[in-house]
Amino acid sequence: MIAFYGYPDDAPLARAVDAARAAEIEHVVIDQHRLDRHDLVTEVAGDSGGFLRTWGTRLPLSRITAVYARPLEPGAASADPAARARAVAFHRAFTDWLDSTASRVVNRPRAMESNASKPYQAQLIARAGFLVPDTLVTNVPDEVREFRARHGRIIYKSLSAVRSIVREFGDEDERRLERIRVLPTQFQAYVPGRDVRVHTVGARVFATAVDCGATDYRYAARDGVPVEMRTYRPPDDVAERCVRLSAALGLLLAGIDLRLRPDGRWVCFEVNPMPAFSYFESLTGLPISEAIVRLLRGT
């Protein structure tokens, strides 16, 4: 049995659940909207390993062979403080179980932690053989000015796993630069070229070429900039490097942001351990959700 953990209205989770349903695979959905209706009992000793009680049904944990988890923060669906406390407690217990179970998990919480620090993850990416942008993390305005003078064009974005809009640093930002004294910020040399998003699902690779004039194509619509996407076949060595990188990070599913420079060299910006693949799947038809279910099923 496959367990799906997250919000049922979260598009990537919903597409994976639909794929399991279409394949007539036995599965259970653990709805984060209503975690107060669930209980989890684990056992350190014994053969059963514990059980999950969901909507009044007792499910032995030994029956769960695989989990696709998108463990977002528990919502505050209930105004009842006791219900909210139960939801938070279940979430913590379940994500702890995801790190310890012998079942196949896409992805284990501990494997996602490299993305919590983008500078740290960039070092792991470089070890895997990809180029990474020249990067500066600072709260000193003069260091940013020197960095910009050296590279000409630079961008800035968050240091952590919190999603942020990547912006090119301009004159307006120069006038606000003193603000970084209380908030260390990550700056990178601008990399020209074409964006390619690679999704790895186990050893399978699904790539999308992105044509867009915006610095951050995810938010191009906000600036009125069109985005065009199509399926893409990266060179075999690049595809293999992506699979090795995901494996080195302990990720069975990953969204890898690459850019192909005009000189033919590949730069990797980051690896998303909980990618919103549905955006790319809906625009290209790549069967990513089906591949996830096949991976969970072990086929």
Image: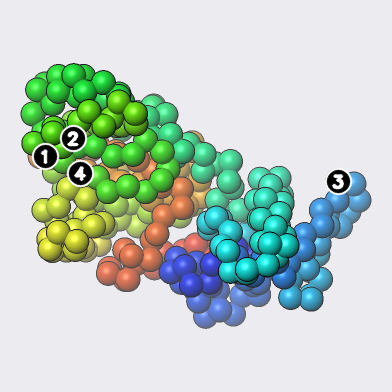
Residue 94 picture location, percent across and down: 69, 54
Disc 4 target residue: 167
- Label 3 vs label 2: CA separation? 55 Å
Say what secondary structure mark 2 lies in. Answer: loop
| Direction right: furthest residue | 46
Eye-nearest disc, 2 or 4: 2
Answer whether labels 2 and 4 touch (C-beta < 8 Å). no
Which residue type carries mark 3?
Answer: Val
Which residue type carries mark 1?
Answer: Glu
Residue 263 picture location, percent across and down: 11, 35
Answer whether labels 4 and 1 touch (C-beta < 8 Å). no
Which is more N-terminal, label 4 or label 3? 3
Q: Is residue 223 visible?
A: yes
User: Is residue 141 found left or right of 137 in the rendered image?
Assistant: left
Which is more N-terminal, label 1 or label 4? 4
- Label 4 vs label 1: CA separation? 12 Å
Which of the numbered marks, if any, corresponds to residue 44?
Answer: 3
Disc 1 target residue: 172
Eye-nearest disc, 3 or 4: 4
Disc 2 target residue: 176
Q: Nearer the viewer, residue 169 or 252?
A: 169
Residue drawn at x 58%, y 64% as measured from the top left: 76
Screen quadrant of the N terminus: bottom right
- Label 1 vs label 3: CA separation? 58 Å
